[in-house]
Image: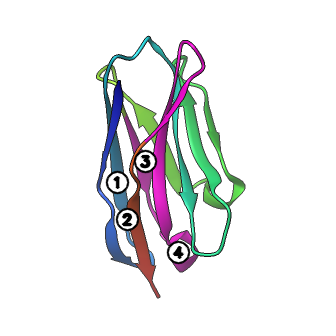
Amino acid sequence: QVQLVESGGGLVQAGGSLRLSCAASGSIFSINAMGWHRQAPGKQRELVAAISTGGTTNYADSVKGRFTIASDAKNTVYLQMNSLKPEDTAVYYCYVIDGFRQKYWGQGTQVTVSS
């Protein structure tokens, strides 16, 4: 069984920064990729950023230049979010794709950006 524990969400003013963390534990057969999605009220869940074990990153156009994704050898993925905007307000979900291409999700963490 795989568990993903997220932390770092909260309330911040526009222009501020937050750093999200997501630690994966349990029976993981290697990790191929990790990343973050977000879902705002009334909207579909969308990819924010992803990183492969080789270090290749991918970002949504709306966050390029403001968000940075990183991971470490302890199966933790981070999302540094700078220059936050009210439209970044959403529940952020981390995910892990293992060697069997199984995708696991975190419980979600709320990010609220006030104007």
Mark 1 or mark 3, earlier in chain: 1
Q: In this view, does 37 lie to the left or right of 30?
A: right
Q: In this view, does 7 lie to the left or right of 42?
A: left
Q: Between disc 2 and disc 4, whose residue precedes?
A: 2
| Residue occupying the point 66% across, 69% down | 43
Specify the quadrant of the image occupied by residue 46.
Answer: bottom right
Secondary structure state at the residue bearing disc 3: strand
> How far apart in space, not on screen, are marks 1 and 3 (Cα)?
6 Å
Dot 1 or dot 4: first in sequence order is 1
Q: What amino acid type is highlighted by mark number 2?
A: Ser
Q: Contact, CB < 8 Å: mark 1 with mark 2?
A: yes
* Secondary element at image label 4: loop
Residue under the image location 58 percent in, 44 percent down: 49
| Numbered circle sitting on residue 17 | 2
In three-dimensional space, the C-alpha distance between marks 4 and 3, rounded to whole angstroms, equals 15 Å
Q: Position of residue 105 (x, y in %)?
A: 47, 40
Q: What residue appears at the point 55 percent right and 17 percent down from the top-left corner?
A: 54
Q: Mark 4 points at which residue?
A: 85
Query: How far apart are labels 2 and 4 at the CA level?
Result: 10 Å
Q: Is mark 2 on a helix, strand or loop?
A: loop
17 vs 93, left or right, is left
| Residue underneath mark 3 | 79
Q: Mark 1 points at which residue?
A: 19
Q: Give the crowd class for mark 4: few <14, some 14-19, many >=20 residues within 10 Å.
A: many
Tell how many labels: 4
How far is disc 2 from disc 3 in space, using C-alphas? 10 Å
The answer to whether mark 1 and mark 3 are in CB contact below 8 A is yes
Coordinates of residue 15 in the picture (x, y in percent): 44, 75
Q: Tell me the distance, in whole angstroms, between the alpha carbons under discs 1 and 2.
A: 7 Å
